[in-house]
Image (tube, rainbow, N blue to C red):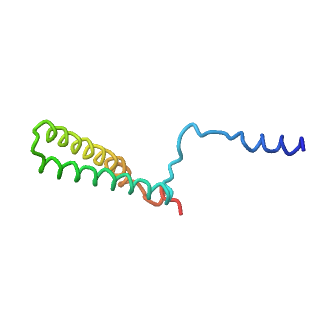
Amino acid sequence: MQQQNQGMQGQQQQEYMQQPPDVLSGKDALYLTDMLTWNLNAAKKAHFFAQHCQIEAMRTEAEKVCQMHERHYEKILGHLSSHENQNPQQYMQQ
């Protein structure tokens, strides 16, 4: 019984990486795609709301929300594009 507890304690202690690996897994790529989709949809919805809003203060806030999601979308896309010129096989993990 005591040996099992010691074995479990050893399994729970993991070493953490100081720097993330230069690998983009399939799961990572899917999550990035999801993040781009979420921000694009949120920007479109905020833009639609701003176009149809009658109250000026709410329209202004909706436009700010739209711009924020556009910035987030562009930032994520920029991070991906900065690695585009490098060898993609180097960063993709099957």
Task: Say which residue appears at 17% left-offset and 52% top-offset.
Answer: 48
Above or below residue 15? Residue 49 is: below
Judge whether 43 appears above or below 18 on screen.
below
Residue lying at the far bottom of the rendered structure: 94
Residue, x 12% and y 46% (percent of image)?
53
User: How many marks can you see?
Assistant: 0
Q: Which x, y percent locates residue 1?
A: 90, 44
1 on left or right of 23 = right
The one nearer the camera, 92 or 12, is 12
Position of residue 39 relative to residue 19, above or below, is below
Residue situated in front as seen by the camera: 42 or 73:
42
The quarter holding residue 65 reads top left
> Residue furthest toward the front?
54
- 50 left or right of 93? left
Residue 48 shown left or right of residue 79 in the figure? left
Residue at x 31% of width, y 50% of height: 39
Q: How far from the left and from the top, in percent, is residue 71? A: 26, 43
